[in-house]
Image (spheres, helix red, strand yellow):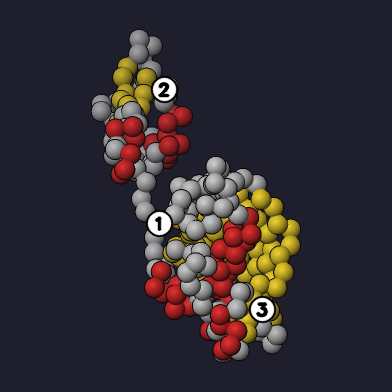
Amino acid sequence: MQLPPFLSCFQPMAVVSSNSIPSLTVGSLSQLGRRSLGCPSLSLKLTHLSNSSLHCSLNVPENTHEDTPMEKRFPPYPTVMDINQIRERLPHRFPFLLVDRIIEYKPGVSVVGIKNVTINDNFFPGHFPERPIMPGVLMIEAMSQVGGAVILEPDVKGTSGEVFFLARVDKVKFRKPVIPGDTLVMRMTLMKMHKRFGVAKLEGKAYVGSELVCEGEFLMATGSDPQARFLYP
């Protein structure tokens, strides 16, 4: 019997004569969407019915995700730039370096960075003592620092500037509070870059898990004045 293409990866448990009329009854097709079609763990069982047709069922093992210890279920974020490489590119230092790791980087296109938010961050004692929430302006600052990893790339900026300045933010929306224990994942996408003037426009979105917590458009300018290295960008 010729199996349909999407079942070609399964081995039948019984050989059926070619003159039999097949009838496919799949009891657990909904589970196929959660599994790869290359699954060696799935088996196809063919049995004869009284009317000489075939009964076909998929034996799909139960999901064992609950059996995996919690600490092993979630892989760590990848590291494209660690904190030392970030410090080499950005001029910011404690207490205003708000990027812990770069997890994705496409030169001249986009960058994704993370900020691990902890109760030890020095702004929480005052914002607020009874209900610690990361200030929105610091979320914007963290996102702009992630964007700085793109515009300070030598092949992008086209100048010898070592610092960048946040010139303007537009269309900013704060959608959900960020609290201690959250990991702020920030994606900055380069929209426009005017190398002649050293000005760049970026789109920024910040997430906690899969939830969008902040978004906006950023206008940044690069500079080469060594005395400006310690100015607030």
**Foreground tag (3 vs 2):** 3
Q: In terms of image quadrants, where is residue 33?
A: top left
Establish if 20 lies above or below 42.
above
To which residue does mark 2 refer? 27
| Front in this rendered view, residue 173 or 91 | 91
Label 1 CA crowd tier, 10 Å (few <14, some 14–19, many 20+): few
Label 2 CA crowd tier, 10 Å (few <14, some 14–19, many 20+): few
Circle nearer the N terminus (3, 2): 2
Q: Residue at x 60, y 64 (%)?
A: 141
**Foreground tag (1 vs 3):** 3
Residue 21 in percent (x, y) is at: 40, 22
Circle nearer the N terminus (1, 3): 1
To which residue does mark 3 refer? 221
Q: Residue at x 41, y 69 (%)?
A: 83
Looking at the image, can residue 116 be seen?
yes
Question: Mark 3 near mark 2, Cβ–Cβ under 8 Å?
Answer: no
